[in-house]
Amino acid sequence: MEPELARILEGLRRARGRVVALTGAGISAESGIPTFRGADGYWVVGSRNYMPQEMATREMFDRSPEEVWRWYLYRFGACRLAQPNAGHAALVRLESALGDRFTLVTQNIDGLHRRAGSKRVYCIHGDAAYVRCADECGVGLLDLPELPARGKDDPFTGADRERLTCASCGAWLRPHVLWFDEYYDEPNYRMDSTLRAAAAADLLLVVGTSGATNLPMQVGQIAFARGAALVDVNPEPNPFAELADRSPRGFFARGSACQRLPEIVEALGAGAA
Ligand SMILES: [Zn+2]
């Protein structure tokens, strides 16, 4: 490990500091989960090719709920066989060591942190394992109904429609994910809790995220403004790496989550794998 990074982490370990880990698509990519941002996310409806940024919207769901659900069921099927990796496992060890001094904030909806064993997790973009009433009638979060995995061309069936109907009010159930034309909030996406955790963090550990969305960047800015330590784990330069470079206790730990997290959490006192 680079001496400067070791020195930053050693200081945090001695001070028994609070740690917020912020994870993004990079850590899931190492488990083989596609990002669905490029060609693998395109979806043909009629004669038109839709981008993920058009499919994952409330507007599209209101217009074509069956198409949006077909797209999600296809995506969820592609994620089903993925397993948590060494990066996820390292964050579980860190939580075991720090207890309430640890908070995990993730942009990933694939549930891999939960499946790895993380408990203190805020899923700020939702969690694909759950659905909720599209009319918000008050039924809360429900488990995603058991539906067969399917290919791109499989039709949406009457049985699908039935399983994806709110038993309480008869409206559609929707995926418990934040869409591009929706806003972060506390009840569904833990926005306030996330900002509070960021404001109390002694270390912000950013993993595999490019900072493209608004709340993660706010978390980075809060930690930076407070002078918290800031470690960015990423194979590529990105806005969080720039923040880390400008921070007196910042470090850009170049590499993937699986490569860098095991040694980082060990230096924070979490014990070896
Ligand atoms: Zn309902």
Image (cartoon, helix red, strand yellow):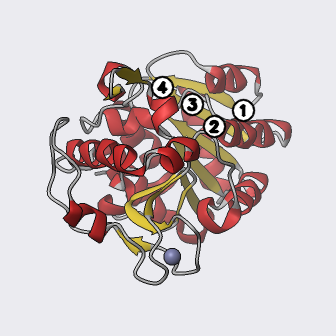
Residue count near mark 4 (Cα–Cα under 10 Å), binned few <14, some 14–19, many ≥20? many
Task: Determine which residue is flagged by label 4.
Answer: 234
- Label 4 with label 3: CB-CB less than 8 Å: yes
Q: Is mark 3 within 8 Å of ligand 1?
A: no
Q: Is mark 2 within 8 Å of ligand 1?
A: no
- Indicate the amino acid at tag 1: Arg
Task: Report which quarter residue 31 is drawn in.
Answer: top left
Q: Is mark 4 within 8 Å of ligand 1?
A: no
Per the model, the C-alpha gap separating discs 4 and 2 is: 18 Å
Residue drawn at x 43%, y 35% as measured from the top left? 25
Q: Nearer the viewer, residue 184 or 250?
A: 184
* Between marks 2 and 3 in the image, the one whose residue lies nearer the viewer: 3
Residue drawn at x 47%, y 62% as measured from the top left? 95
Per the model, the C-alpha gap separating discs 1 and 4 is: 17 Å
Q: Nearer the viewer, residue 30 or 53?
A: 53
Residue count near mark 3 (Cα–Cα under 10 Å), binned few <14, some 14–19, many ≥20? many
Residue drawn at x 58%, y 80% as measured from the top left? 138
Residue 107 is at least partly visible in this image: no
Mark 4 vs 2, N-terminal side = 2
Element type at marker 3? strand
Mark 2 vs 3, N-terminal side = 2
Q: Residue 249: give its label.
A: 1
Residue count near mark 1 (Cα–Cα under 10 Å), binned few <14, some 14–19, many ≥20? some
Q: Position of residue 164 (x, y in %)?
A: 34, 66
Q: Residue 232: give its label.
A: 3
- Label 1 with label 2: CB-CB less than 8 Å: yes
| Vertical position of residue 25 compared to residue 138: above or below | above
Per the model, the C-alpha gap separating discs 1 and 2 is: 6 Å
| Vertical position of residue 113 compared to residue 170: above or below | above
* Between marks 1 and 3 in the image, the one whose residue lies nearer the viewer: 3
